[in-house]
Image (spheres, rainbow, N blue to C red):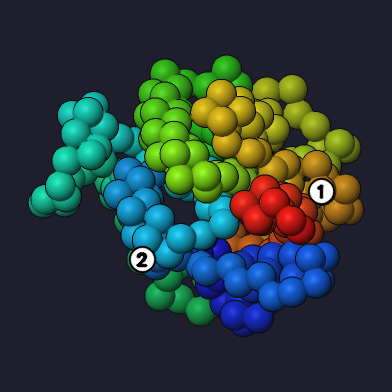
Amino acid sequence: MAHGLFVPYDETLARKTGELASKEIGHPVQVENLGVPGQPGPLDTYHRLNEVIALDPDAVVLVISPADLRPIQAEDLARRDDPIGEPTTSGQAPRLGVTALIHNFVIGNSTAALMAQHFLFQNTDTYIRASLYSNEKSAYLLYPFSADLENRFDGLRILITDMSAKLKARNIPLIIVALPSCAEAALLVPSRKTANLAPYAFGDRLRDISLSSGATYVDVMHAFAQVQRPETLYYIVNGHMTGEGQVLVAQQLAPAVVRAIGVAHRGL
């Protein structure tokens, strides 16, 4: 769970979760952040499970955001336990069209353009409309989900079920957190409820996948919904969560980590 861009390490989700769990238990709890730069897909995460197990953890936390819901090729899913060979197309970001490429180049290389976006997006309605511009990036907000998104969820279900089983065989609980995007968090406010948008749908589906696979699901969506302007817990232009947002997530996650440690040690 990386989620630390522009955030001091002491304010990241991993560090804050460890601090809060340590206070509750009364002795140090170490939370290792094994997130990697970029946007690896769920298959990449699955392939790193043995690396995680080698650390002999009391629990494994898998933080999933809408951006992590990458497509997985059927043949790659079927061969998920084969030795890792050449990189595949599974989990890679979709190719961008010419308009998107031009947009990214201009915005990414112009301080003035970035500043303009920052000021424009202070208006939440403007930000939400801009976030819905790309069907690819906003599909998780539309329910019923598209066939493509359902296929992605099906692949994720298979991977999480296998991960949970492998961890359970070693008495290691799997904890899953659905991390809302900035647009998703903004839409959680009841006054912004829109008939054709379903900001809870992504989290609800991950909860169902978690429970059916034997994993523990930690709900953070409702905590964000209690914030007057939850979009302020993100860097509004790039959508990364701020330190304050990560503290809010850690407050929901730490109790689940404490319970997992208690199960692992049976005496706490």
Mark 2, Cα crowd under 10 Å, few <14 / some 14-19 / many 20+, is few
Residue 105: give its label. Answer: 2
Query: As drawn, is 51 to the left or to the right of 15?
Result: left
Rounded to the nearest angstrom, the CA distance separating label 2 from label 1 is: 35 Å
Q: What's the amino acid at mark 2? A: Phe
Q: Residue lying furthest front in this view?
A: 267
At x 68%, y 23%, the residue is: 196
Q: Is residue 168 visible?
A: yes
Mark nearest the camera among 2 and 1 is 1
Q: Kindly indicate the quadrant of the structure image that contains residue 232.
A: bottom right
Query: As drawn, is 177 to the left or to the right of 219?
Result: left
* First of labels 2, 1 by sequence position: 2
Front residue of 26/226: it is 26
Determine which residue is flagged by label 1. Answer: 223
At x 57%, y 57%, the residue is: 58
Query: As drawn, is 118 to the left or to the right of 4?
Result: right
Under tag 2, what secondary structure?
Answer: helix
At x 57%, y 17%, the residue is: 144
Front residue of 70/155: it is 155
Give the x, y percent position of residue 226.
88, 48
Residue 142: give its label. Answer: none
Give the x, y percent position of residue 183.
65, 47
Front residue of 186/101: it is 186
Q: What's the amino acid at mark 1? A: Ala
Q: Is residue 100 above or below residue 166?
A: below
Give the x, y percent position of residue 205.
59, 28
At x 30%, y 49%, the residue is: 47
